[in-house]
Amino acid sequence: MSAISILNPKAEFARAQQALAINVSAAKGISEIMKSNLGPKGTMKMLVSGAGDIKITKDGNVLLHEMQIQHPTASLIAKASTAHDDVVGDGTTSIVLLIGETMKSAEPIISEGCHPRVVTDGLVVAKDEAQKVLESMKIPVSLDRTFLIDVSRTALRTKVHQVLADHLAAICTDAVLNIYDKESKSIDLHMIEIMDMQHRNELDSCLVRGLVMDHGGRHPDMPTSLSNCYILTCNVSLEFEKTEVNAGFFYSSSEKREALLASEREFIDQRVQKIIDLKKQVCPPGSDKNFVVINQKGIDPLSLDALAKEGIMGLRRAKRRNMERLSLACGGMAMNSVDDLTPDCLGYAANVYEHVLGENKFTYVEDCKNPKSVTILLKGPTKYGMVQMKDAIRDGLRALSNSIQDGFVVPGAGAFELSVHKALEKLPMDSRSVLGVKLFSKAILCIPKILVSNAGHDTQALINRALYSKDGEGVVGLDLENGDLFNPVSAGIYDIYAAKRQLIDASIVVVTNLLLTDEIMRAGLSSLK
Amino acid sequence: MGTPGEIITFQVGNYANFVGAHFFNLQDPNINPDYETDFSHQVFWREGRNLQKQKVLTPRVLMFDLKANWGNAFIRSSKDLSEPSVVTAASSYSHPAKLNKVDQAEKNISWEGKVQKVVLRNDSSESEDDTEPLPGTVKSVNAVKKKVKLGPYDFCSWGEYAKWRLHNADEAAFRIPNFMYNAGSDELVSYGQGLDVYNKLHENVEDGIRHYAEECDHLEGFHMLVDEYDGFTGIAGGIMEYLGDEYDKKACLGLGLNYPFPDNENWSKKRTLKEYKIRVSNTAQLWSSFTRHSRVFTSFGVTDDIFSINPCSQKFANVVQDCTSPYISSAILAATLDSLSSPYRLHSPTFPLHEMTSVLNAFGHKMTIIGSAFPFPVGQQTLFSALDKDGFSSLSTLTPNASIDLQKSFGNIFVMRGISQDRVMSKSETREYKHADIKSVTACLELYCQESYTRSVHVIKDISSSFKLRYPFPKLYDDTYLDTHSTAKRFTNPQGPSWFLPTLATAHNTPTTGKVLERIIGIIGGGSEGSAMKLKTFYELSAATCNTSLVDFEDFADCITELCALKDSYSSE
Ligand SMILES: Nc1ncnc2c1ncn2[C@@H]1O[C@H](COP(=O)(O)OP(=O)(O)OP(=O)(O)O)[C@@H](O)[C@H]1O
Ligand SMILES: [Mg+2]
């Protein structure tokens, strides 16, 4: 009987063998689910929510978030592998698989009576060696467009079909190169807006060097397409708002109230006039210049009317985030008042036009001179397809920003895992760590094996060739198209350095914790906090 | 002045959605076209076109509820209405009795040992609530006439009786999955958790608000319906702060809703001291957020005493249904809100929302009390004699823990509906009392108020159209009572007759509100005689429910200080 049952007779518990069995089965279970999704040839999962929503995905991170995982151990694994998603955002599937495989091969060893400590000590040795292999394999990143396209294409091809992946890879790379800040060597992915438009075909997705806003003018006489535009971005109310001060309760006479309302209107009209004055100043009659106002606050019909009469395009209630992005894309600055407007406040875009799609209007602010903020416009006929593309783009962008910031990438297509295996096999070791090292060296092969089997080739034959034959010397990867071996670098397949690091670290930490667990108890606490 | 200003509604929380579902059912312009009523649909509804270019009216609303509470409600938008088989009925899991009726295919997908049930329904013959199909829906020929469902427990989710659609469910319906706040627990319990959820959602919420606002030419303000006892308060807190930032000139009416706290298993679990403390802390934090960012707010519900560990529901004379059912109690609240909002829903509103709020929050009195006489029992008498005999004794308060003390109040708003000119005074009364000048409802009420309650300012609004009680609004009274008090009865509805009732809805700027605030401050241990220890226990209990602490002790103490300042504004007079 367990000690806990004396303290709390209601407690559920599982000891030694049983605890291990629970952890192993959870780890196996979750990796079994994700197995088929790994790599460019992996298959998809269709998630159906209680309400009947459908999501089709093969992204490990998305899957783990959407599945309602109930098993505590499985949920621990899920949390550990998605923990770094905000930073790295890749390699989740691999982590889950590696944990599953390691646990699976550890089980018989421990069942035979070997103390888990011995195994985990060996794992630490294996980890250090794997780290060394990673360092020796890394390739420095250059800011060359074709190279970066390769990097993002590798990531994207594991998420969407090839043709689309290649199309999106170019878009992602151009977007990142546009916003890359050469001085501070930093990338702010927030400066890339992803917009979706349910329209046409996936391959019509494109990069807009500027902004796309999801609203348009609200006046029938307003221009819908202008070129050579000055852009005024402001956060100034251009609508007649009846503030509480002028409400009836406080005013003895209705004339007094009317007078107050009239002066309020006057006040708004003056603001509009100031904008019109500026327009007249920068777009003298006969010039080919035009004027666009993008306002974060409201613009009421009377003000819109005044603007339309001057041929000004006016947009109201712009997204707060877009205000900042507008000044980055077009130049100029966002104004909080119209009192001291000067031409310096204005931005510039070569084309501003409206696009109507059913009930929705979109406004493009395009061809800015030197945009520090760009928009990826995703198009597609179905909603779930777009969600899938969005997740993929996110991965692609993250791959680029990670590799630029790390400064390194690693050859992909299983090359890293194969090398780790070879290195561990050759590693001289003492009798204590041998079990752990051997175990890990075998477990890490699961990634290349699954990659091959997902592609429908003969796993054993290809892996053996890679490991033991002459073709397998040097850096060698798995050519999943032809069921052959190749050099991933010459094929342009790169993995993210940080993701591989994470793969080794996270999986060993989790496995160590799980193996060293000798008792699981559920003591009726609703939360362990 | 003339044009009605648009209002955006927020329904934050399960009970808020119960109330909102009724509220929009009552106004539905698809049943009450503008030319038939005095009301303009423009205030609460947006006009759009579906793919067939037909006009579609949908409420301007943003809804928040836990994923589990949605059932199949609103999985489609009005945009998709053209598709022939619209899924309308809500999920039937919780309703074993219905299971065998529904033609369904069940599939069990095993995920991690957990059986997930996917219920696919072939529903076109079973769309049970669509008696008036919306434009574009194909009404099935073999729709069987069903037993009318109007009992308190016939609807266990709001999605089952909400007859309206959303314009864009992706943007306006926030289904909150449990992993977002606390995997492992199915409920959103504390303000801090709610704020956490809001922070994860805020971009989408802001976009939703912005899209509605961008379409409005004369945005007037917001109705904020929030459950004031659970973690949805935190979501509302987040939204309120954003509104305060971005829409500071717009009027926001805050309604903190109270669940009727039925005596069932689910709720008895919650009547522990710990749950109670978290509940009161949530309420306090919501109220302080309202104090900061709304024009005026109230606590709204049929609950008797929200500061008791064992709250129970108020009894309403004549109501024959069980008021602890959320479906019934939310109907009472929605009816009151429907009447109270009617002056600003007119085609040419005489009393827009911002004016109403400025009457109610004069002297900084941001918390108001709402009362209702539903129906206003004139029976066969004239308004004059009814007032003369009973005054406002039929008025009951819908703000828990507050009484309506008209003698003391500073300002009152009375919205009287459905009493026609000729019912104001009879010829003999005019002669007897020598009040020949009294020709209208307004004049009659004005006279009564001025004579009885000399110290306060009264704003009286008279709306000629009555309240229509009809399916799926519950039949709260028995037939005799309804027949006595209705001004008309019609049999246009296959599910039963509609009654036209006169109603009175009121809101008060009154010092009794100070008492409510005093009570909550006293319980939590704030204010000058408060105890920091007590305050700390309240804080720690709710903080312990959150994974990340977004509300620190200082913030919490500030909330209470805010409420103290509000309370003091009432006692200074
Ligand atoms: N063209 C390719 N040929 C062979 N292997 C590839 C190719 N592209 C990627 N891989 C391999 O596929 C694996 C990555 O697969 P995938 O992106 O599906 O999973 P993941 O990165 O572990 O998880 P996540 O779902 O988070 O992206 C890496 O091991 C990578 O080396
Ligand atoms: Mg990947």
Image: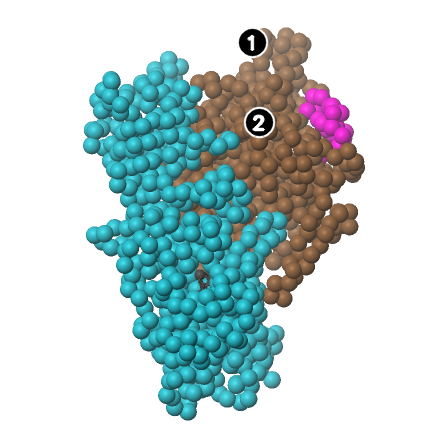
Chain colored cyan: A
Quarter of image, res A231:
top left
The span shown in magenta is B473-500
> Which residue is pictured at 43% across the width and 87% down the height?
A434
Chain of the residue under the numbered disc 2 shown in the image = B
Chain colored brown: B
The residue singled out by tag 1 in the image is: B437
Quarter of image, res A246:
top left
The residue singled out by tag 2 in the image is: B53
Q: Position of residue B302 (x, y in %)?
A: 60, 41
> Which residue is pictured at 28% across the width and 41% down the height?
A371
Colour scheme of this structure image?
Answer: by chain
Quarter of image, res A17:
bottom right
> Which residue is pictured at 76% across the width and 25% down the height?
B491
Q: Position of residue B266 (x, y in %)?
A: 63, 55
Q: Amino acid at mark 1?
A: Asp
The C terminus of chain B, quarter of image? top left
